[in-house]
Image (tube, helix red, strand yellow):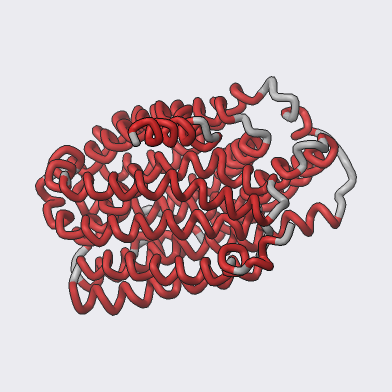
Amino acid sequence: MINRLLQRVKKIAQTDFVKVTSLSAVATAIRMIAGFVSVKIVAKIIGPSGIALVGQFTNFITMIGSLSTGAIGQGVTKYIAENYDSPDEQKKIVVHAVRITFISTLFFSLLALVFCRQISWIIFNNDQYTPLVMITAGTLGLYSFNLLLINILNGYKGYRKYIILNIISSILILIFSIFLVVPFGLYGALVNCIVSQTIVILVTLFMVRHEAWFYSLFSKGKIERKVVKKMMGFSLMAITSAILGPLAQISVRKYIAECISLDMAGIWEGMNRFSSMYLSVITTSIAIYYLPKLSEIKDNYLLRAEVLKTAKIILPLLAIGCIIIFISRSLIINLLFSSEFKPMENLFAMQMVGDFLKISSWLIAFLYFAQAKVKGYIIAEVCGALILVLLSRVMVKQYGLEGSVYAYSLTYFIYFLIVLFSFRSLFFSPTGLNR
């Protein structure tokens, strides 16, 4: 019995996913520690209401940053990985990705500059922070080009450099948090959202300058409609999530602020930030290994096997982690936040349930990207965002702040059913496994 168990553990430890996860363990630990320290500093100095505003601004930067790449990031990773045996095709993907990113960045930078005052009103309910929106627009090229380089590196399976970049980025974010938030408070925290996301381009360029594909970035070549069409299919999927995800969070956060208070919106944001930090140990490994691996597999039988194998590794560990976090919730709040965040304690139970369902659904939802199922992905994302916003409004009104995590958990339960239904032939039908 013991020998069988040891053999099982050894077999799991030898899987590619675990090797990548082990390789990223140090990066994830550093990111989590840096993230925890950063959150502690920000929470202590600007309080729950400040955290809420930082959350609004972060969602905006994430949204416009993704759009400025033409929202082709996942497509770049997929098609580079998929064409691993054809360097010429890979080069075409890189060349087209650079041009799409340049045009998109120019367009969205100008758009943000023209409507900077209106954007400030939408995010902050005043125009006091208009200059920050303008700075974001001015530095958008650095942010989008960095995203592009990281997606290209991931497509070429540059795991080690990808992980080192994660480590350096985490350290930079922490350093800028200290030097901007401590003396300048809320305004410094908002500026940090911009600086920490853009300065890392210098590190990325240094890391990839000797990569074989690097000079392809500057290559000239004929624009091929076939390549653009493939990339734009992914663009539609990524634009959907890039817009709907942040907008849904902005909507929920604003509703909590209006219905309860801005401080409660900040506590909700604190809960979200904590989830993002501890889930990064999984999401990093998924980003580095999972999508490129799924993109390489052409056989449905092997594709299902890869999803199930990864789920068997991730989900039991995640379940144990969620239980430990729930038990330690009071300690976590005291260590990472402040006494002002005490109401967060009531959010942990359903947040952990929602996090488990979220990762479970993502493991299946990545098949949309791997198989380029544009229509199905858009339908699932639209449904998910609408359900989250509507349920949040109903449940926050009825149950207060705790209603927000009820809505979160129920949304991802429904989303899980949607994506499982989309790929029912792969998982439940023998005909879907024809080689």
Where residue 137 appears, as percent x and y from the top left, is 54, 49
- Where is residue 219? Give x, y as percent: 82, 34
Q: Residue at x 72, y 58 (%)?
A: 232
Residue 394 image-quadrant placement: bottom left
| Residue shown at the point (32%, 42%) measured from the top left | 189
Residue drawn at x 48%, y 34% as measured from the top left: 11
Residue drawn where x is 48% and y is 56% of the image: 362
185 vs 108: above or below: above
Q: Which image quadrant: the C terminus?
A: bottom right
| Furthest residue in direction right, as rendered | 222
Give the percent coordinates (x, y) of residue 144: 59, 44
Residue 402 visible: yes
Residue 21 in view of the camera: no
Answer left or right for 9 relative to 399. Answer: right
Q: Is residue 282 left or right of residue 108?
A: left
Residue nearest the observer in this picture, 293 or 198: 293
347 and 136: which one is in front? 347
User: Is 107 placed left or right of 260 in the picture?
Assistant: right
Please determine whether, in this image, residue 310 is positioned above or below residue 88.
below
Q: Position of residue 338 (x, y in %)?
A: 14, 44
Q: How many marks?
A: 0
240 vs 291, nearest the viewer? 291
Instruction: Assign the N terminus to one quadrant of the image.
Output: top left
Camera-side residue: 272 or 418? 418
